[in-house]
Image: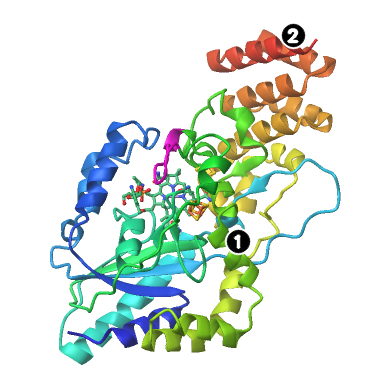
């Protein structure tokens, strides 16, 4: 069997924060739970997330017939938060994972580089030819189940994987290989009696420990949903315009990690060595200072994204401006129409009258989705100017869904008088 220590050391050198190994056996319990969730409608809204997909993703040998081991990886995206602006402009909030560059673009080349190195290593040390499949997020792999079994972290009740050093602020990835490697043990840790995240979720998307209702999760509503946001959920979304971190922000494990960010290197090394990982832990802690700086650069808030962008100027973004500003960032996924839809909801929730002219302009946007949500926001903010604009738009609006939104907005305004 190949020695895992050099493999782990190389993973840390590449910039991963945790490198663990598990066998390539199936994940029958995960498959059972996923199928149960799909049947209960909890994964509705993600049409690609099917039972058939779950069958493949829970059987590594369906993805690589010769699969023997999985190298599980985690990369932390913790960075210093964006500067708090001093003005009082209405602002939105973007979840932490999206402040910097698109993590898929950062991690995929590292996986490729890892596999190239592994190929050489396997040839040199065992005369074996590497077969491997690389996964991060979008691939048909159950990233969290792999991470849990490999000892990267444990399931929190908010369903995220919590790690010792980085809390849940990590991206997960894996390399499924044909190499026989010594497997690590899962961590013996859990949330205990804590249930903070369940109570903090603003939309009730965590109905029970370890259960997430995709249809109610703001992450889904702001990133994955292509159509209208359900009316009853809009007021619960506050000023979140891309993703949601609330169930992670309230988590005491994450809070401890964030406080520790200022820890000296020596203390961190002692802490790592103390949790039972010997050789790899030593390599890891020696390499950490460099990695820390590099990581912060990749995931630190980009000026064009920021964590708390001004909302009113976002409403005026053209397609070209959207592309120039958000290409190579996670925001790209929402597309212009999705982002502007979310901006309208946030402005409606903030209720700031300074947004009225921009929202009236958005009533004439080329995208029906944006027009409809602008109407809702005007209904929330109210005022004579908003009423006039809605009435005027109604005379020309042909899209039935937008007409419905305008009529509802006018009813909201009637209720305010
Ligand atoms: C679909 C998806 C989403 C959907 C649906 C989420 C969901 N319910 O799974 C939406 C869009 C809502 C979403 C949101 C987010 N996501 Co997402 N998402 C995924 C994706 C593509 C698939 C997840 C999946 O398989 N879900 C199916 C459910 C049933 O699986 P599960 O939650 O793991 O279920 C397990 C637990 O419930 C557990 N369990 C059940 N009962 C019990 C009982 C006990 C006692 C225990 C211990 C465990 C347990 O077993 C189940 C099966 O393993 C993965 C990438 C991937 N390929 O895996 C990323 C992924 C899970 N997402 C990720 C991230 C970062 C996020 C967000 C934080 C983004 C944001 N800031 O907005 C939020 C977090 C929301 C949350 N609280 O989880 C990371 C998670 C990193 C981490 N530390 O866990 C992943 C792994 C992407 C990556 N490669 O880094 N996501
Ligand atoms: S990400 Fe937000 S909406 Fe989704 S479960 Fe967590 S707190 Fe609830
Ligand atoms: S908030 Fe509490 S219950 Fe939720 S994931 Fe963190 S430790 Fe677990």
Please state the extent of the stretch shown in magenta in the rendering.
207-215
Q: Where is residue 77 in the image (x, y as percent from the top left)?
A: 54, 65
Q: Quadrant of the N terminus?
A: bottom left
Residue where numbered disc 1 is placed: 255
Residue at image coords 48%, 34%: 216
Q: Can residue 8 be seen in this view?
A: yes
Is 108 positioned to the left or the right of 49 in the image?
A: right
Secondary structure under badge 2? helix
Residue at image coords 46%, 48%: 158
Residue at image coords 68%, 55%: 306
In three-dimensional space, the C-alpha distance between marks 1 and 2, rounded to whole angstroms, equals: 45 Å
Q: Which mark is residue 414?
A: 2
Q: Position of residue 386 (x, y in %)?
A: 78, 18
* Crowd class of label 2 (few under 14; some 14 to 19; many from 20; radius 10 Å): few
Is 11 positioned to the left or the right of 61 in the image?
A: right
What secondary structure is the stretch in magenta mostly built from? loop
Q: Where is residue 126 in the image (x, y as percent from the top left)?
A: 17, 88
- Give the mark toward the camera: 1 or 2: 1
């Amino acid at each position: 069997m190949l020695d895992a220590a050099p493999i782990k050391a190389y993973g840390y050198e590449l910039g991963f924060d945790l490198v663990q190994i598990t066998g390539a056996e199936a994940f029958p319990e995960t498959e059972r739970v996923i199928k149960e969730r799909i049947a209960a409608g909890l994964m509705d809204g993600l049409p690609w997330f099917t039972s058939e997909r779950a069958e493949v993703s829970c059987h590594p040998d369906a993805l690589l017939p010769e699969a023997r081991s999985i190298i599980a990886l985690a990369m932390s995206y913790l960075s210093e938060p964006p500067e708090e602006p001093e003005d009082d402009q209405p602002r939105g909030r973007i979840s932490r994972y999206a402040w910097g560059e698109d993590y898929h673009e950062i991690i995929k080349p590292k996986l490729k580089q890892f596999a190239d190195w592994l190929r050489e290593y396997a040839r040199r040390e065992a005369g074996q030819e590497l077969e491997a499949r690389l996964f991060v997020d979008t691939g048909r792999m159950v990233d969290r189940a792999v991470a849990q079994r490999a000892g990267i972290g444990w399931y929190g009740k908010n369903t995220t994987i919590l790690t010792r050093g980085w809390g849940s602020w990590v991206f997960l990835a894996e390399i499924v290989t044909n190499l026989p490697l010594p497997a690590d043990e899962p961590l013996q840790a859990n949330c205990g009696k804590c249930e903070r995240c369940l109570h903090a979720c603003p939309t009730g998307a965590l109905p029970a420990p370890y259960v997430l209702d995709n249809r109610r999760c703001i992450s889904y509503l702001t990133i994955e949903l292509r159509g209208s946001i359900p009316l009853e959920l809009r007021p619960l979304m506050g000023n979140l315009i891309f993703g949601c971190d609330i169930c992670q922000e309230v988590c005491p494990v994450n809070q401890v990690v964030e406080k520790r960010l200022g820890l000296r290197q020596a203390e961190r090394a002692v802490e790592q060595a103390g949790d039972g990982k010997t050789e790899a832990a030593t390599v890891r802690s020696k390499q950490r200072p460099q990695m820390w700086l590099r990581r912060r650069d990749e995931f630190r808030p980009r000026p064009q994204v920021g964590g708390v962008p001004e909302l009113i100027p976002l409403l005026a973004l053209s397609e070209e401006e959207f592309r120039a500003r958000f290409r190579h960032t996670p925001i790209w996924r929402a597309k212009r129409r999705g982002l502007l839809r979310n901006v309208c909801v946030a402005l409606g929730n903030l209720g700031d009258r300074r947004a009225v002219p921009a929202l009236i302009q958005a009533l004439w946007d080329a995208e029906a989705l944006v027009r409809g949500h602008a109407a809702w926001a005007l209904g929330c903010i109210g005022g004579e100017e908003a009423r006039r604009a809605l009435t005027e738009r109604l005379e020309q609006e042909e899209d039935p869904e937008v007409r419905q939104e305008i009529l509802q907005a006018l009813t909201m305004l009637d209720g305010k008088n």
